[in-house]
Image (spheres, rainbow, N blue to C red):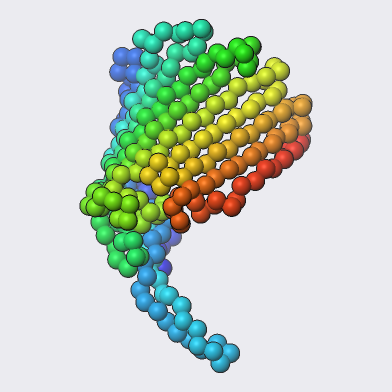
């Protein structure tokens, strides 16, 4: 593995933020090594162990440099009427452009250079559903994100390998989170749904928190994951569904 010496390669970031009317905007810059290495296959080596020949692949790895410029825009959508006592929706958009990124070909044999472009939009609000909760709002957060990798041909069989996993020409995801409070905020149900539309995969997580006292807290968590594309996205964890109970005591 080719890794930088300790205290040699720093990571530099800067942000310029300003209030523009009723909106908050920022410009961001980042330069530095990725946290995760990229492993390239370099061949096959054999060795004899206890009289038996063993073959195993050899790999070369290094931490690629990431160069990013991005931004954020956040604004309350005051033109939307607050029907039934709902909160004013908050809209937020973030974008990032990373140029000359190092990725791997899908057979892990060569490094390639591509540009990585990302855009995400988030909408947050509080909605009254009196039939389910007469005393508190349901906080709803919805997100859509798309990632574009340049130089990748269209089609499901074409992709590059990034430090975050395989990525195709266009990669689309949505997220929906819903939560509310009952019984003086002592009971909190949470539902999170993530859908990977590019790889036809999903993750559904539900949590029920109960604050018995300032010291004792209980929670029940259920996680369900799945996908239809072998070896991609959440499909790798398709048999990792679980239900868990946790109790916590604070001193």
As drawn, 50 above or below 161: below
Note whether residue 99 is visible: yes
Q: Quadrant of the C terminus?
A: top right
Q: Is residue 155 above or below residue 14?
A: below
Residue at 70% x, 23% y: name it. 186
In this view, 94 is above or below 198: above
Residue drawn at (51%, 17%), measured in percent from left and top? 126
Q: Position of residue 179 (x, y in %)?
A: 58, 25
How many marks are shown on the rendered structure? Answer: 0
Q: Residue, x 37% and y 36% (percent of image)?
A: 145
Image quadrant holding the N terminus, namely: bottom left
Q: Quadrant of residue 104?
A: bottom left
Q: Position of residue 85 (x, y in %)?
A: 51, 8
State whether residue 60 is above or below residue 80.
Answer: below
User: What percent of the width, then of the height, locates residue 45?
Assistant: 42, 82
Q: Is residue 135 left or right of residue 59?
A: right
| Residue in the picture at 43% in, 55% down | 36
Image position of 102 (left or right of 219): left
Q: Residue furthest bottom?
A: 51
């Amino acid at each position: 593995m080719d890794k930088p010496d300790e205290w040699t390669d720093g990571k530099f970031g800067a942000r310029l933020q300003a209030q523009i009317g009723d909106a908050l905007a920022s410009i961001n810059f980042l330069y530095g090594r990725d946290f995760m290495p990229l492993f390239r296959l370099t061949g096959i080596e054999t060795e004899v162990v206890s009289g038996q020949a063993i073959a195993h692949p050899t790999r070369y790895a290094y931490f690629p440099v990431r160069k990013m410029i991005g931004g954020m825009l956040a604004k309350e959508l005051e033109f939307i009427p607050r029907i039934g006592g709902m909160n004013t929706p908050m809209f937020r958009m973030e974008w990032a452009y990373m140029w000359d990124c190092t990725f791997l070909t899908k057979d892990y044999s060569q490094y390639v250079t591509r540009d990585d472009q990302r855009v995400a939009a988030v909408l947050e609000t509080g909605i009254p559903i009196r039939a389910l909760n007469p005393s508190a709002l349901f906080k709803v957060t919805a997100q859509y994100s798309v990632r574009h990798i340049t130089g990748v041909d269209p089609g499901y069989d074409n992709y590059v390998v990034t430090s975050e996993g395989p990525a195709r020409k266009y990669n689309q995801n949505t997220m929906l989170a819903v939560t509310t409070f009952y019984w003086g905020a002592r009971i909190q149900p949470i539902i999170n749904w993530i859908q990977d539309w590019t790889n036809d995969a999903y993750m559904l997580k539900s949590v029920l928190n109960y604050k018995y006292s300032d010291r004792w807290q209980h929670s029940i968590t259920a996680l369900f994951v799945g996908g239809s594309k072998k070896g991609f996205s959440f499909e790798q964890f398709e048999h990792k569904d679980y239900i868990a109970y946790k109790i916590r005591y604070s001193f």
